Amino acid sequence: MLRTLVSQTGFLLSNIKNNGERIMGSINTLLGDAFFNQKAWDDESTCYDVMNSMEAKGTERELDEIGIKESDTVLDIGCGSGRMSIPMARRAKRVIAIDSSEAMIEICNRNINDSGLSNIDCQRLDWENDDDYEKLPQVDIIIQARWSGGASSLKKYMKKGKKIVIIEWAKNSPRVVRDTLFKDCFSEEAIQEHPELAPFDPMAYTNSNEGYRIKEARNKKLRDELKEVGIELHSKTVQGGMEYFCTSKEELEKKLLYLSTHPHLVNLEKFKENIVPFIEEKEDGWLFYYPTWSKIEWFNTIIEV
């Protein structure tokens, strides 16, 4: 059987139906609502970095499933503060980390410097911006981890990567975790001034929301394209968890407090009550653990013809 890159044949690509193209229009970056736009990620960057540090063990489990080799070059799209980029760099030859959020890139570069690794190239680029996209090299693996914008087209993937990995939350996303820990912790006045503190409404990210509809259209379009050319999509759910250990309960409470974007507005008494089910005293300190699950999907852009 002859193995060849789909992107080089042109034949199979001509048969891909552009389902959802009308819905997508000329959108380069999703700005459906506050959850999807760049400013929101800038605002989230500090507490997002705290959450990333709590996901270290789960991140390693996700990387185990991806199967990164020492010879691989990996592109991390939407790298955030480096949750996957940094541990990936310990497994791969080179990692290219990109994000459209300036604040995320600043924190990511700081974390890279702290790691002592020299094989990560971190840049502020937007995968959905055509000019930025063309600047990116071809790589062995492309990873989009929990990228709220949804999957991109098969054609874009094929031009830049041999293996594509998409990771999304399966259960207990950071927003769910935070809503649990900070339930009834903010006054009505605080929520009016900072609407993002309002409890998460799952219905807000369904058919009534433009950003969600665009994301779902992109996901469906990619699956249709894969099916059209006979590329198999693999899937696995991996348990992770947000976990943090401190030598004292007070230190742990302080750390968890910064999962809120506005810790100074938190009702501390209610907050301490909320975290009780998720903290446990150990012989040498206190442990916080909240179980989470991620769905990993992957496919190869090399197929047999």
Image (cartoon, rainbow, N blue to C red):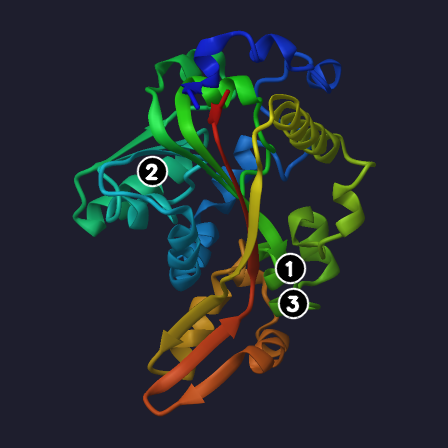
Going by the numbered disc 3, the residue's amino acid type is: Thr
Residue 296 or residue 171, whichever sits in front: 296
Task: Give the CA separation, mark 2 to mark 1.
Answer: 26 Å
Q: Decide if residue 290 is on the left or right side of residue 179.
A: left
Classify residue 99 by image quadrant.
top left
Q: Are marks 3 and 1 in contact (CB under 8 Å)?
A: yes
Residue 139 or residue 252, whichever sits in front: 139
Label annotation for residue 106: 2
Q: Decide if residue 119 is on the left or right side of residue 258.
A: left
The spot of residue 301 in percent (x, y) is 47, 26
Going by the numbered disc 2, the residue's amino acid type is: Glu
Q: Residues within 10 Å of mark 3 (few under 14, many from 20)?
A: some
The residue most toward the bottom is: 283
The residue most toward the front is: 1
Task: Give the CA separation, mark 2 to mark 3.
Answer: 29 Å
Q: Secondary structure at mark 1?
A: helix
The spot of residue 297 in percent (x, y) is 54, 43
Residue at image location 21% in from the left, 51% down from the top = 115
Q: Residues within 10 Å of mark 1 (few under 14, many from 20)?
A: some
Label annotation for residue 176: 1
> Looking at the image, is 187 positioned above or below residue 157?
below
Label annotation for residue 180: 3
> Looking at the image, is 97 positioned above or below residue 126?
below
